[in-house]
Amino acid sequence: GRVVGETGTFEPLDVYGYVWNDGRIRRIDAPRAAFTGAEEINERGQIAGTYGNDFASFNTRGYLFDRGRFTTFAAPGGRATQVFGLNNRSQIVGYTISAPDATDERGFLLARGVGGPFTPINVPGATRTIAIGINDHGQIVGAYESPTPGSDDQPMAEALSLGHGDADGYLSR
């Protein structure tokens, strides 16, 4: 099997992705990036991840690495795009951040791969929603955070799972 991940140093920032296959490690570096995170690999050998130049600024983008070529993307209006999942249909999930303090994570689905369109994934009433994985049937798993009733709006993390067709701008529990 194949394994992807990232390694490197944070001072100075030099983090790169890698794919381990048949006992060999191949370095994955997005062009002109200080860090490249390889998050997921599918059976076709496509790798999805996140890259950028500064963790602190939340200025990141997503990518799909396929047959030696990077195709990059960013969520519309987002400061940061973080990729977590990829399936064998090239569908990609993750989350985006717009606020400078990173308090507004919103999940997304690219149901047609990097060609878009971006479909937001938001649990009604949740302060944050992230999509972590997607299987080949289009079922998405993730997490969300919502205020706990009666506790001065303290956040409570909950898991979510979506069936096919549930990711059209909102989620059902």
Image (cartoon, rainbow, N blue to C red):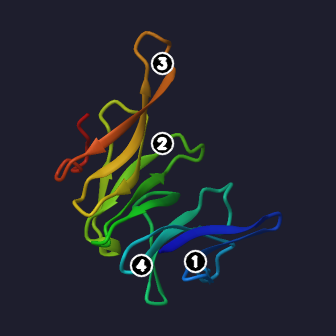
Query: Which residue is tagged 4?
Result: 46
**In whole angstroms, how far apart are the C-alphas of marks 2 and 3?**
16 Å
Q: Amino acid at mark 4?
A: Gln
Q: Earlier in the sequence, mark 1 or mark 4?
A: 1
**In whole angstroms, how far apart are the C-alphas of marks 4 and 2?**
29 Å
Q: Amino acid at mark 1?
A: Trp
Q: Is residue 97 above or below residue 51?
A: above
Crowd rating for badge 1 (residues with CA inside 10 Å; few <14, some 14–19, many 20+): some
Whether residues under marks 4 and 2 lie with C-beta atoms below 8 angstroms apart, the answer is no
Q: Amino acid at mark 3?
A: Asp
Query: Which residue is tagged 2?
Result: 104
Q: Secondary structure at mark 3?
A: loop
Point out which mark residue 146 bears.
none
Crowd rating for badge 2 (residues with CA inside 10 Å; few <14, some 14–19, many 20+): some
Which residue does the image show at 60% across and 43% down from the upper left? Answer: 101
Q: Earlier in the sequence, mark 2 or mark 3?
A: 2
Name the residue at the left extreme. 165
Give whichever of 86, 106 is nearer the camera: 86
Q: Secondary structure at mark 2?
A: loop
**In whole angstroms, how far apart are the C-alphas of marks 3 and 4?**
41 Å
**In whole angstroms, how far apart are the C-alphas of marks 1 and 4?**
13 Å
- For the C terminus, the image quarter is top left
Q: Earlier in the sequence, mark 4 or mark 2?
A: 4
Q: Earlier in the sequence, mark 3 or mark 1?
A: 1
Q: Secondary structure at mark 1?
A: strand
Residue 137 lies, in percent from the top left, at 22, 60
Point out which mark residue 20 bears.
1
Query: Which residue is tagged 3?
Result: 153
Q: Earlier in the sequence, mark 3 or mark 4?
A: 4
Which residue does the image show at 38% across and 33% down from the upper left? Answer: 126
**In whole angstroms, how far apart are the C-alphas of marks 2 and 1?**
34 Å
